[in-house]
Structure formats: structure tokens, C-alpha cells
Amino acid sequence: MCFKLLKKDKSKSLQNENTDIKAELEDKKMKIAVLTSGGDAPGMNAAIRAVVRTAIYKGAEVYGIERGYNGLIRGEFKKLEVRDVSDIIQTGGTKLYTARCAEFREDEGVTLAAEHCKKFGIEGIVTIGGDGTFRGALDLSRKGINCIGIPGTIDNDIACSEYSIGFDTAMNTAMRMVDNIRDTAQSHDRCSIVEVMGRNAGFLALNTGVACGATSIIIPEDKEFDIDDVVAKILETKEQGKKHFIIIVAEGVGGVEEKAKYIEAKTGIESRATVLGHVQRGGSPTVRDRVVATQMGYHAVELLLAGATCRVVVMKDEKITDYDIEEALKKGSPLHKPFDEKTYEIANAVSI
């Protein structure tokens, strides 16, 4: 009887010891977090999924922060497991929600966020968004929290990266919408002036215009733009037998209603304006956005686990690499990002 009791006690002691060791190992696991900030973009969920599963695969714990830097300031961390990110790779929007945070522009807000991170043992954060998101990551990294940025914006206006998550999906969405508009424009011999998103950059407008065979593409990068040149082109192609017209206007140029009225007055062709708006942000991401988001999410986690900070994951020469965030932000505003002049030239040449 005594032997059995001793054996049982010994077994219980070993069990407790193993539990303690396991708990100690759990405590030693690196804890990272992921958030999405700014405007949503198709493919953000694919990036979140990649971050979560890569971190777990490599032995780290990962936490989700909802509503961007707002959630970080409030200290709202939710542990994510493998199954928490199942069936989201094909969905638009962001599982973690997103928001812009005025408080994070102040040092007090950044300091509070850093304190919450340290309190919960969060050693690094993957931030998915645009240049505003990266500026927040830079400020947070200066408070001792390792940060890695992933470009996620349909505008593709991140100066340091050739490509940002959501761009391909948004282009395809805009193209389908313009194709639908063309059907009615053709039926009524109209001119349709369509505004696409893109903030102060014309990347989305240019590619959508080429894909839709637009008569003219109006973008902020063309400083010599003159609406009368568009009118002249419409009249010229009308003389050649063309009866309906598509004009693509970048959001940064705007004024589609006024342009439609002007074109109608000068050409006599019934003209209608359409602003596509936020329909371009939604929808299931394309193959390209799912793959690039996954690659970038994986690379971001690798950087954090290696102890890196203040980096932004980018695409350069169709390969995934990374830059220093501070240096990346110094590269200039979206208007200084190299514009595809050749494609713009081609668009003007074939739209006759």
C-alpha cells in the first residue's frame, strides 16, 4: 500500500514537473500580433491568414488586434489559432476590421499602445495598410516594439513597392463595372465618363482604361492635360465612325459631372458621369492578390522572428524583399512614384 502511494505521488510529482516545464516553454514563445489599418483592400485576409499560420508553424504565438491602431491603444489582443483563419483567403475586407486612428498621431497614443504591448508581452507587430499605417509603425518601433509593414491598398501608391495587396482585384472589379457601363453607352450612342479610385495616383485609372479600351484616360500624373484635347479626340473618332465613348478619370482628378456637361456641350453627344466608388474595394481577391499577400505575410513573420524591426515588405522586380520604413517613406509621395509612361503612351496610341 505504501509503495503504491509513493509511486502515485512520484507520478503526480513528475506530471506537475512536466506541466511546469510546458508552461515555461509557453512563456518563452515569441508573441507577435497583426492588425489592418486605413482603407480595406482585397487580399488583406490572405495576409492575415499567412501571418497567423506562419507564426504558429514556426513556434510563435500570434494575436489579432481589431480596428487597427484603435484596438492597440485600447489593449485589445485576441489570441489566434490555426482554425481561426480558416476559409478567409477567398474573402474581401478584413477579418480584423480596420479604422483610421487620430489618437495614434499623437505621442500620447503611441506611448499607450507601446505600454499595452509590453504589458501583454507582445514583441512584434505586423501592420497591413498604406503609408499612414507605416508611419504609425515607425512611431511604434521607436517606442521599442518591433514592427513590420505590409502594403495593402487598392491605389498601389506605396512609393517603395511595385505592387500592393488589393490592386489587381480592384482593377478587375473596375474593368467589369466599366464593361457593364459600355453596354448601355453603346445602346444609346453615349459618352460615359467614369471615375475610378486611386487617391492622388493614376495607376488604377491607367490600367482600367487600357483594359477597357477607353477613348481617353485622365490622370493626375499628366500635368499637360486639357479637356479640349479629349473633346477633339471624341470628334475625330466620331468622324471615323465611332458612336460611343468611354472616358476614365482618376479620383485625384475628379470633377466627372462637370466634365460630362462640358463634353456634351462641345460635342453634342449625350454624356453621363458615373463614380464607381467603394464597389472597387470589395469582392473576392484574385489569384495574384492571394498569392502576393501570402508571400508578404510569410516574409513579415520571418523578419519579426529574426529580430528585425522598422521594415516594410515590398515587391521589387517581381520578388518579395524589404526596406527600412523610414527610408521607404522618404522616397516621396505617391505622385513621385515612377509612373508607367510607356503604357500611357500605348493607351493614347491604340485609342483611335
Image (cartoon, rainbow, N blue to C red):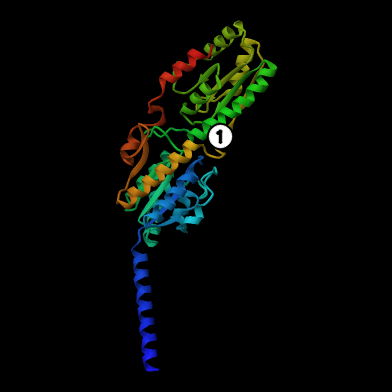
* Camera sees residue 113: no
Which quadrant of the figure has residue 123?
bottom left
- 293 with respect to 263 (left or right): left
Q: Nearer the viewer, residue 135 or 204?
A: 204
Q: Residue furthest bottom?
A: 1
Q: Position of residue 325 (x, y in %)?
A: 33, 41
Q: Position of residue 328 (x, y in %)?
A: 33, 37
Q: Please state the total of marks drawn on the protein image.
A: 1
Q: Position of residue 18 (x, y in %)?
A: 36, 74
Image quadrant containing the N terminus = bottom left
Q: Is residue 39 above or below residue 266?
A: below
Q: Nearer the viewer, residue 163 or 216?
A: 163
Residue at image point 45% right, 19% down = 344
Q: Position of residue 159 (x, y in %)?
A: 38, 33
Image quadrant containing the C terminus = top right
Q: Residue furthest top?
A: 239
- Three-letter residue code for mark 1: Gln
- Dot 1: element: helix
Residue at image point 52% right, 28% down = 251
- 94 with respect to 116 (left or right): right
Q: Residue furthest right?
A: 188
Residue under circle 1? 280
* Camera sees residue 303: yes
Residue at image point 39% right, 90% down = 5
Residue at image point 55% right, 19% down = 214
Callout 1 environment at 10 Å: few (<14), some (14 to 19), or many (20+)?
many
Which quadrant of the figure has residue 273?
top right
Q: Is residue 203 above or below residue 268?
A: below
